[in-house]
Image (cartoon, rainbow, N blue to C red):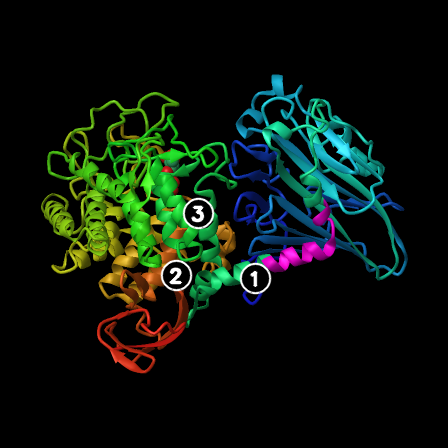
Amino acid sequence: MQYGYFDDKNREYVITRPDTPLPWINYLGCQAYFGIISNTAGGYSFYRDARLRRITRYRYNNVPFDLGGRYIYVRDNETGDYWSPSWQPTRSDLEQYTCRHGMGYSIIGAKRRGILASTRYFVPLDENLEIWQFTVSNERQTPAALSVFSAIEFCLWDAQDDATNFQRNFSIGEVEIEDGVIYHKTEYRERRDHFAWFACSAELAGFDTQRDVFLGSTRGWDRPAAVERGESANSVAHGWAPIGSHHVRMVLQPGETRQILFVLGYHENPKDAKFDPPDSQIVNKKTAKPVITRYLIPANVDAAFQKLRTYWNGLLGICQVMTPDIHTDRMVNVWNAYQCMATFNMSRSASFYESGIGRGLGFRDSNQDLLGFVHMVPERARERILDLAATQLPSGGAYHQYQPLTKKGNNDVGGNFNDDPHWLIVGVAAYLKETGDWSILDEPVQYDNQPGSEQPLYEHLQRSFRYTLERLGPHGLPLIGRADWNDCLNLNCFSDTPGQSFQTTTNKEGKVAESVFIGGLFVLAAKELAGIARHSGHADEAPGYLAEGARMEETVRRHGWDGEWFLRAYDDFGNKVGSKECAEGKIFIEPQGFCILAGIGLDDGLARRALESVRKYLATPHGIVLQQPAYSRYYLHLGEISSYPPGYKENAGIFCHNNPWVIIAEAMTGNGDGAHDYYSRINPSAREGISDVHRCEPYVYAQMIAGRDAPTHGEAKNSWLTGTAAWNYYAIVQWILGIRPAYDGLQIAPSIPERWAGFRAVRRFRGVTYNITVRREGPGNGVKLTVDGQPVAGDVVVPPADGRGEVAVEAVLH
Ligand code: GLC
Ligand code: GLC
């Protein structure tokens, strides 16, 4: 069953009923001002950092959990009937509800009793504000006397404190109201130099800024007293809960349409110019006012919206494909790329499953996110790489997370996740292949954000590499530390007390437990680092990296192969994890995918053996589960992985992030059918028809789909912020379709299903547009290339020497 449909032409997903199984959300803003918006207008906004600069409030674990948002109420002033065009919060019966989630905007609207009302929400490029462009039409035969109320609830900035520290917070709220604009200035009197403002383009009949006056002390958002009454109270918040609500009255003639703009913004003042007059406590609005005025003019708002559309058309235009599969096309061309922007911006910080007050940007996560993002805005990828590298520790290890506002490593979590450093090599390699910008390697970057500790980025990569060499275990495999990619495989933790962190409680010295997964990752990193060295004037170092990689590859073959698949790890007792010898957790997905991705076993059949085992033991119709058999009870020596009931999350859930590793492995071994088959099993668009089972948005990936051991097999969870986005994008575009940036040019090496007659693609790469046609002549994946009609050897198209901006590439598969 479905709750909507894809409007491919407009790059929108159209939700046709408000009661989706979960809030189906979209992101507003893609630079510094961000918002989350659900299909019923729930959600919140923040500036740069969801924890430290929260603009509107979110109540955690609410029911339903997207309650609290960007609400508009429409009231019929003759009958007193009132309703919300986004269905929530009044949940009135609606005719014609639709929510269109598009690229950086959402349009939510409905009709009730002859009144059609809809709001387009978006954040203009290069501005720190969001626009609610509200349109209302009278489709009745008679004039309609209406009231329109806006409503948002301000957050007192630090979202964690806002949600907990009531004894203080109930006394600090402050606002100003000037010319109908509501200014939220809590804590501005002391150390803050920023405030929020909420403006309306229409003449006001009134306003409210004190929540309990607007709602009534015993009511919620579904029945605000002011709306019921049809009159604002012009309340001024002193303490308690500051809100912003405007009230506009109008009479619409039959057939008449009116537009009202509501604009919510964030503004910073210089520390020495906070007040106006300077010796007062009144917010200096001099630099905010021109912005407010500009966006209360409809023509400017329409122009800003067009600019946003053009921006997204440009970004998505960098890579467009036309294949025989609609689900591939719409994910690659629109939604998966779009999701990669969200994961780049948010990392794992703010969604409806990440509260915005927990994790900031993750070292491992953000490096991987680059794989799906770097081609879109390489300058921002560059900046991110340098920020990440600056949180690396002198040891080569890294802070596991950092806060986006301060860009400082998070001490509570610390480091010693022993896979972390290598993801920097993977991220930098992706950046270099895309851009050819070798200058990044010379950028001086601090360690642990310490001034004076600057070293070229290249040295950071070398330290990443050495980090593992200095931390090898009894079998010569990398020691696992707190965890590797699988945060929940905690082999040194032995946590027995409720509430302890599984990752950071460490009861073992950590000199025994080893990770085969990091072994694979190290082999890949060695190859990438050798490639980087060869192309950047360090060619003499390349053989050394390759030799270390080869040594590790040997170790993996010797101590990391279990007969039919790659082992997962050795635990603190030196026992195998992910082996046929184990009672539970005999086979894990991660080393199968990652060892092959690193090239291990491609030439001697181990890779095929491992992939057959994956198909036999781990594959389900809903995707590939993380391990089998699931752990049926808690194992002290394995940690969080065994804390989850079987089939969920890392305990044999379909952890979508690692499915693409197997997809890539299948593609590398030439099995295009197998690769695309796995790709389709978790492709959200391909699962749209089972939305009642899948439950999450059909336009973006979720972190997890419940595995076969779970009672809810097939149910997705934790949508949006997941490494799944970047990895699937990378798997389908670079490995199945085979359009792969390489140091010397654009490689074309598809591994597509045998039944596909071919496909077309347009890829802009280093300033050149490649018009690519792939045509199947034989059943295999061997490639014969012609570039502008001339046959070329190999499968790499080098950039045209004569500066042509466009080339035609034909690849014939035989
Ligand atoms: C989450 C984390 C990621 C980790 C994965 C597996 O997605 O964000 O860092 O690799 O879980 O545990
Ligand atoms: C939990 C989650 C895991 C995530 C980790 C982040 O362990 O299960 O997916 O990576 O938290 O700290």
The residue depicted at 56 percent of the width and 67 percent of the height is 9
Tell me if residue 717 can be seen.
Answer: no
For the C terminus, the quadrant is bottom left
Does 654 appear above or below 741?
above
For the N terminus, the quadrant is bottom right
Q: Residues within 10 Å of mark 3 (few under 14, many from 20)?
A: many
Question: What amino acid is found at the position of numbered circle 2 in the picture?
Answer: Ser
Question: What amino acid is found at the position of numbered circle 1 in the picture?
Answer: Thr
Q: Quadrant of ligand 2?
A: top left
Q: CA distance from mark 2 to mark 3?
A: 24 Å
The residue depicted at 22 percent of the width and 63 percent of the height is 669
Q: Is residue 606 left or right of residue 662?
A: left
Q: Reply yes or no: does residue 298 show up in magenta.
A: yes
The tag on residue 680 is 2
Q: CA distance from mark 2 to mark 1?
A: 30 Å
Does 582 appear above or below 537?
above
User: Dot 3 lies on which element?
Assistant: helix
Residue located farthest toward the top when viewing the structure as drawn: 167
User: Dot 1 lies on which element?
Assistant: helix
The image quarter containing residue 110 is bottom right
Say which residue label 1 marks. 310
Question: What amino acid is found at the position of numbered circle 3 in the picture?
Answer: Phe
Say which residue label 3 marks. 344
Q: Residues within 10 Å of mark 2 (few under 14, many from 20)?
A: some
Where does the magenta region start and end?
Answer: 293-307
Does 366 appear above or below 273?
below
| Proximity of marks 1 and 3: CB atoms separated by less than 8 Å | no
